[in-house]
Image (tube, rainbow, N blue to C red):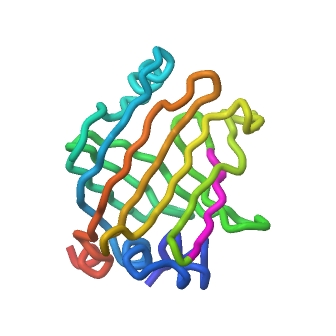
Amino acid sequence: MPRTLYQTILGPELDKVPVEIRRMHSFARVAQGTADVIRGSSWGARLVCRLAKLPEARTGVPVETSFEPIAGGERWTRRFDGQPFQTDMMAGKGEAYPCMLERLGPFLFKMQVTASEQGIDITPAEVSLGPLSLPLCLAPRAVGRERVVNGRYSFSVEVTFPLIGKVFGYNGRLEPAVLIDDAETV
């Protein structure tokens, strides 16, 4: 069976994280749950959200995430109340630290992925706009955290832009709904 994205990125470091997180990134093809979605209130944040077609701010939004294998990684499709938001995630190669590359429109985010007994932290390391590398102080910033809260896989993501501040974020809980073996037989 091919390795999942986080198995490839973290290798044996993935064993550090709680079992609920390992299960999500080792066996799930589809996960379902709920999320609270927030948006920044500035005109710049509203514009970015509109252009990127990001979900509206709401609490208790039904969310589904699918992890589809692609060359070099996975395509993550998050559906907030049915509205899709898709990015391609790839394992970084030849880096001094475990990293993941995420393509979102014209941006390519290189993010450091850190495993601990508390969970997984994802922090920006580099950002490119097309062929141009951006200084981190001028680049959009996305920070992600995966934890176990009350025995359930929980996540949080916050996106900020320089001069704009908070643009978008979401946090919630997911449970595996379709496992890799189930997806292979469908």
Q: Which residue is drawn at 52% across and 71% down?
A: 6
Q: Which residue is drawn at 51% across and 72% down?
A: 118
Residue 38 lies, in percent from the top left, at 36, 36
Along the horizontal axis of the image, is 96 left or right of 43?
right
Q: Is residue 120 depicted above or below 145 in this figure?
A: below
Q: In this view, does 104 lie to the left or right of 178?
A: right
Counting labels gives: 0
Residue 64 at x, y percent in the picture: 26, 55
Residue reaching furthest to the top: 43
**In the image, is 124 to the left or to the right of 44?**
right
Which is the main secondary structure of the residues drawn in magenta? strand
Q: In this view, does 93 lie above or below 184?
A: above
Above or below — where is 28 with respect to 173?
below
Left or right: 96 in relation to 49: right
Q: Nearer the viewer, residue 2 or 84?
A: 84
Within the magenta stretch, is there residue 114? Answer: yes
Q: Does the magenta stretch include residue 131?
A: no
Residue drawn at x 50%, y 58% as measured from the top left: 145
Q: Give the range drawn in magenta.
A: 109-116
Q: Where is residue 24 in the image (x, y as percent from the top left)?
A: 38, 72
Q: Where is residue 26 in the image (x, y as percent from the top left)?
A: 42, 77
**Residue 82 lies in quadrant:** top left
Q: Quadrant of residue 160?
A: top right
Residue at 29 percent across and 63 percent down: it is: 174
Quarter in which the N terminus is drawn: bottom left
Where the C terminus falls, by quadrant?
bottom left
